[in-house]
Amino acid sequence: MSKTQQNNNPFWGEGESKDFGRMAIEYAAGEDVVLDAAFVQYECLVNMAHIVMLYKQNIISNKIAAKLLTGLVEIRKLDQKGRFILKKELEDVHSNVEQYLIEKYGIETGGYLRLGIARNDQVYTDTRMYMRDKIILISKQLMELINGINELAARHTYIVMPGYTHLRVSQPVTFGHFLTGKAYHFMDDLNNILNIYELIDYCPLGIFEMAGIHLSIDRELTAQLLGFKAPTVHSLYTANQRGELEAKLLAEFSILALHIRRTMNELILFTSNEFELLKINRSYTTGGTAQPNLENPDTLEVLRANMAKFLPSMVQMMMIMDVLSSGYNRDSQQTKPVLFESIEMMIKSLPILTGILSTLEPQKDRMEKIANLNFSIAPSVAVQICIKGRISFRQAHKIVKMMIKERILKTSFAEMTPDLIAKAVKKAIGKEILLQKSDLENFKDAKQCVLVHKSRGGPAPGEVKKMIKDINLKLKSFQKEIISKEIKLSESKKLLEKEVNKIVMLN
């Protein structure tokens, strides 16, 4: 192939000088060809659905349809073997597929491929199909993550650990309570990402450039053959959604990444020498090259750093799109690398996160010791004095604060007695109240206190077990939803294959 041909696109370069478009291809299209390798299978399916529809609408003959479909099946097989190589001078997957068919069957037949379809609605449809598949994969990974967390929580409903306010030891919780809190966050992320699937699940094919076509096309049929819920409702609106849907997905990834970053930060702290609340499985740590004593949380740190990329990616996506006029603009092609890199990073990261969290080892004795520091159960003690002493909470708050600040209690609430409290009440608020020993027995240490925190959503083991059950029930519901989506996509592929075979067999 000559240099002139290499720099000349046959679809828009005919009759132009050899340098026409050369810099445009070099600068604007080079990366498209590399990225579009991920779209070859989708592109073939989109074209196959379109050809089946054109034939059923009596717009093209059986002979032409059969040849085009046979060629598309051939491209799919070549791609699966890694032998369909996209040519840079053809800019993208759409022109590469079309040119292959033209070279195979001649322009008289191959030239029909683009009848009633444009690269615009092709790429919109390819992208949505790609996003659907990736959302299903990421959703399944999130389910594995949540299930792993939930199983660990079920084993540790009675282990007390410190809660923190301003990173100071505060109300104690249980390790199971801490973990189920994470599970609920990630379940929110799963729900939100699946909601994006619902927005994506409409077929753009048939909007042509952005204003439809005068042919009697059947957009409902192509949507059905490609597993979409329905065709999109408005051609220009559909064109203008490019980049917006991707940005919405990245926005949900950004919140998921925030949850992951916060969790990694906590684990790095909680596994440090100063805290020693948890141990990380050694598969996720490394040694120090200069310090033989170190065991470093490298995997957690890299995961934390990688999660910092999602918010900038979402902002980048928004900034690419926010100045564009209605319809197609070549700027929108630059959304592909942002989308692809973000999706692949999340797919790569979630199994690592699942491994880290599901193999955590709680340090029970240390957790309970730290949970008792700083008079952590003071709020509960104040509430108990309020109720049993029949004084206001603010008065009880003042009493407890005085007992701590004036060192009436030296180290913990285990020192409390009815007489000691009576003296503190008299000194703090000038009243006389008498509590019974039984009024105080559950408020001596963190573990006893946690066990009676049975308010809905609290850290008591019984409540945590309810949460674990609730999470499992919700996971089953999500699993049904995901399986339903997978079945629908599988059935649409079978239907498309059946229609293709019918047309090919007739020829």
Image (cartoon, grey):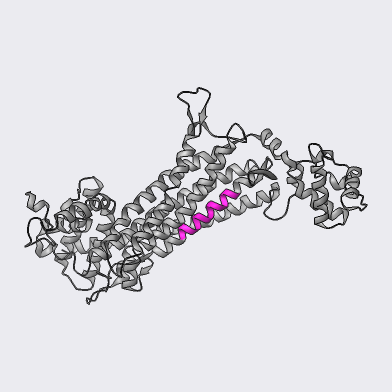
Please provide percent x and percent y for residue 329.
27, 64
Please provide percent x and percent y for residue 364.
66, 35
Q: Magenta stretch containing residue 428, yes or no?
A: no
Depth check: give the residue in front, 310 or 357: 310
Which quadrant is home to the C terminus? bottom left
Depth check: give the residue in front, 19 or 127: 19
Quadrant for residue 108, please give it.
bottom left
Going by the image, does 318 lie left or right of 2? right
Q: Magenta stretch containing residue 193, yes or no?
A: yes
Q: Residue at x 7, y 59 (%)?
A: 17
The prevailing secondary structure element of the residues shown in magenta is helix
Going by the image, does 408 lie left or right of 496? right
Depth check: give the residue in front, 180 or 143: 180
Q: Is residue 389 visible?
A: yes
Q: Residue at x 83, y 58 (%)?
A: 392
Quadrant for residue 116, please give it.
bottom left
Going by the image, does 329 lie left or right of 288? left
Residues rendered magenta in the picture:
181-194
Residue 122 lies, with reference to residue 39, above or below; the image says below
Please provide percent x and percent y for residue 189.
50, 55
Please provide percent x and percent y for residue 18.
7, 56
Depth check: give the residue in front, 282 or 301: 301
Q: Residue at x 41, y 52 (%)?
A: 312
Residue 399 lies, with reference to residue 247, above or below; the image says above
